[in-house]
Image (cartoon, rainbow, N blue to C red):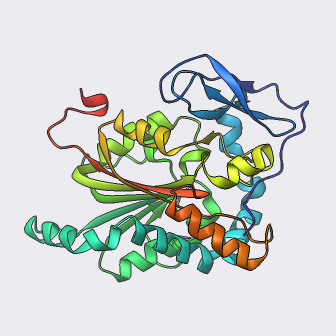
Amino acid sequence: MKTWSMPRPAPEARDQWEAAPCALCGGNRFRRRLDCGDFFYVACRACGLVQMNPRPSAAVIRRRYGVEYGGAYLAYEKKNEAAFLRLQERALEDAGFYALEAAVFSESRARESSPRVLDIGCATGSLLAALKERGWDTIGLEIAREEAEYARARGLDVRAKALEEARFESGAFDAVCASHLIEHLTDPASFTEALYRVVRPGGRIYITTPNIDGFQAQLFGGKWRSAIFDHLYLFSRATLSGLFERHGFTTEKIITWGGLAEGTAAAPVKRIADRLAKRLNAGDVMILRAVKNEGRGGPGGK
């Protein structure tokens, strides 16, 4: 399916663009990685993280998810809701979410509480609704107000806030999901620090994002379907796990999938490419499962 992307601003309307250091190691030495025409991605020479640089300011990015394009984005999410839910559930199954579910429920009963899950960037709330039916106490975050309102109308607790603004208590959640979110953030390190705080010790996170080291990225380069203006970061398995491990998590599993996009090859070729990509862990998209370390004082192991 087509990756959502809002209209790009005109090249001359870039007075609010800014340079940014590497979000993983803080470095300022880069090499050009992907040329996308009127913008480009660079790779950090120290750690390899790929990011758009220069890029729009945080204020400009936040406005892009406001009312100007909200209606079109909601229509896109509603049209693809069932397909997105199937993909999310398959990814969670591959990452072991459902296999670990019984243990989470058992631990929650021992604490005399309900198992709690947070879905960040929950869009229309379809995954939250499915998890609620399975017995989870669910909360969602969605900064696009139209999507948040739509999810609340279906009886879900969804708040139109970023994680850093939500003010959850420490250790509030047994599990956190964030599907196709982290690549949009202006400050993934700040997000990861906030994530560490709200997950209980031993709790798990499930992060889904495009894979810059996947077969499709290597094949299409700057025309890769995930090299779009709304994606500020493009992670590899190494840089994604490195980000979370720097902030107090241990990576347990990374699974990738997707060999060729629909329409780029005949169906038999696509099936072969998809199987190979998953087997070789060179898929277009990946999901990371990580656990919050116990007995550590906070991000960075301090």
> Which residue is found at the position 29% from the left and 57% from the top?
173
Judge by depth and name the residue closer to the eye, 270 or 212: 270
Q: Residue at x 14, y 72 (%)?
A: 106
Q: Is residue 140 left or right of residue 232?
A: left
Q: Residue 210, how many percent across, how many down?
A: 60, 53
Q: Position of residue 198 (x, y in %)?
A: 31, 48
- State the residue in front, 122 or 268: 268
Q: How far from the left and from the top, in percent, is residue 70?
A: 72, 60
Residue 259 horizontal side relative to residue 244, left or right: right
Say above or below: 173 vs 243: below
Which residue is the extreme one toward the top?
28
Residue at screen point 91% across, 30% down: 12
Residue 65 visible in the shown view? no
* Image-quadrant location for residue 53: top right
Q: Which quadrant of the figure has residue 40?
A: top right
Q: Residue at x 89, y 33 (%)?
A: 11
**Residue 86, position in %: x, y?**
54, 77
Residue 215 in sight in this render: yes
Quadrant in which the N terminus is drawn: bottom right
In the rendered view, tell whether residue 82 sits above or below residue 39.
below
How many marks the image carries: the answer is 0
Residue 258 left/right relative to 169? right
Out of 57 and 89, give the one closest to the viewer: 89
Q: Where the C terminus falls, by quadrant?
A: top left
Residue sticking out furthest to the bottom: 133
* Residue 242, picture quadrant: top left
